[in-house]
Amino acid sequence: MAKRIDVKDLNIYYGKFHAVDGVTLSVPPRSVTAFIGPSGCGKSTVLRSLNRMHEVIPGARVEGDVLLDGQNIYASAVDPVQVRRTIGMVFQRPNPFPTMSIRDNVVAGLKLAGVRNKSQLDEVAERALRGANLWNEVKDRLNRPGGGLSGGQQQRLCIARAIAVRPDVLLMDEPCSALDPISTLAIEDLITELKKDYTIVIVTHNMQQAARVSDQTAFFNLAGVGQPGRLVEIDDTEKIFSNPTQKATEDYISGRFG
Amino acid sequence: MTTATLDVNQPATPPAFQHLSTGRRVKNGIATALVWLAFLVAVIPLVWVLVSVLARGAHMVANADWWQQSLGGLLGDDVGGGVYHAIYGSLVQSLMCAVIAVPIGLLVAIYLVEYGRGRLAKATTFMVDILSGVPSIVAALFIYAMWITTLGFNRSGFAVSLALVLLMLPVVVRSSEDMLRLVPDELREASYALGIPKWKTIVKIVIPTALSGILTGIMLALARVMGETAPVLVLVGYSGYINYDLFSGEMASLPLLMNSERVSNPSPIGTDRIWGAALTLVIIIALFNLAATLLSRLVAPKKK
């Protein structure tokens, strides 16, 4: 199930703007990697390029390789739709589909891929909702609209929706930034649990969160406004937060930055 | 004694909050009066039209025959008969128009919102803008020149539908485009991230989310073209008899009936028929608007 990701010399552009410069990193399977860094440093851009969501934006393009268990997802023969089916994503703001019930939201990925079998869909919905720690809260109202849930529940619904299609990798773009501390804790516990089955990459602005949930941490920075973002260093989370190699990392983590 | 103490306790500076100045109160009064005046100017003609149509048409509409019979075989000063033939014509012509205009308009809107980049999209938007400014008589004469003079077909209800398409299309494109643009990109991204292809995202996620607004726009456009007069005057003949065939022969519609009675029937009965037909048209359009509201509420995304 879980697969490893190797990024080799990745350059990302928005039109003529060079957004990210020469990123090389590896994410081992069944682990959590956190991307931290100041706003505009390109960490979300790198995350979005890991499942080819980046190219949804007009004018955006990528140079370099992203290997999923050795296969380049940017090879010309690869279908981006299949890449996204294999590498799921959870976004900053919870975005359940407003026209669908809770159950239909969870199974949307399968249903729209052509799965019709009702008992199979029910089974998947329950498994995914249990996996996202939401089952007990919503099992009595599966046919109610997903928009009626609280923000934290909606975000867990989105995680359930992402894991329902059984991806190999789960990308999370600041999944807790719109949530209160209790919902954040619920999501963090969930991330630790999901680590058993998935390779997880999470972008976060919250350094305590990175320290709590991740196995390795990548620090991104940019030299100045208009300059491309780049990867400063990536290492075990413990090492990054106790004894980083780079001065810039230490400054950022200790709050001396900017 | 007490006043003296108070004076001592008062701070030397004036209080920070003072009462409303006279200048601002006057300005506020003038602005309020202007807003009310504008409201009245807008509402008076509307109420006036409604009241006079109701007052003079109600006794015609209240008769069951009015909805079930045509004016076939009746002379200008014969009491009785109905406008069943004209209601049928109006509905069928505008529904045929919708059958053609709605799919095209919706597809154009989807192109503009989801795919259109660069010159072609800009040109399309420009053309739609131009089309929405075309007067109905020009649309009617264009269809006359193309469909009847050039292609050699006869005048018919269908020719009317074609002219109405030209009038309805830009309204459908515009309203659908606005509604599709209101769908947040986050939903599209959520769908792509599940490995759902773009076309399926549009069909299953974007359109259902915007459907309520799209339907309202379509119904309002339909109600609007139903009252169009120029196309029916130019493109089809009037008949007091019912004609079920949209593609050939003379076919009545409510605006055409009103005009025909006005031109050819000077008797008081003719005047009654005109007011009755006017009220009938108002009622049908009101029903369409009501249906639009109910329908859009039915398909709108629900919270609870």
Image: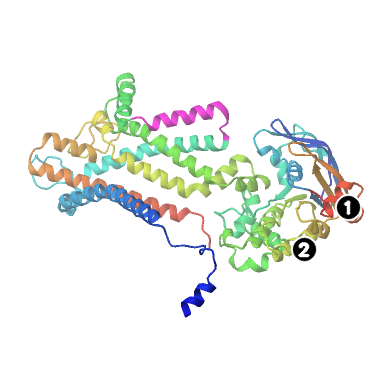
Residue A247, image x, y percentages: 89, 47
Task: Using residue B154 as the reference point, say whether residue B215 is left or right of it.
Answer: right
Q: Is residue A170 above or below residue B271?
A: below
Q: Which residue position is annotated with label 1?
A: A240
- Please tell me which residue lies in front, B48 or B127: B48
Task: Using residue B143 as the reference point, say whether residue A48 is left or right of it.
Answer: right
Q: Secondary structure at mark 1?
A: helix
Q: Which residue position is annotated with label 2?
A: A189
Q: Secondary structure at mark 2?
A: helix
Q: Say which quarter of the image contains residue B232.
A: top left
Residue B209, image x, y percentages: 53, 49
Is residue A60 something that shows in the picture? Answer: yes
Q: Is residue B144 above or below residue B92?
A: above
Q: CA distance from mark 1 to mark 2?
A: 22 Å
For image coordinates 26% across by 32% down, the residue present is B230
Tag 1–tag 2 contact (CB < 8 Å): no
Q: Chain of mark 1?
A: A
- Please tell me which residue lies in front, A177 or A199: A177
Mark 1 or mark 2, earlier in chain: 2
Q: Is residue A104 above or below residue A27?
A: below
Per the rendered image, the range of residues in magenta is: B115-134
Query: What amino acid is labelled 1 in the image?
Result: Ile
Query: What amino acid is labelled 2 in the image?
Result: Asp
Give the main secondary structure, helix, strand or loop, of the magenta stretch.
helix
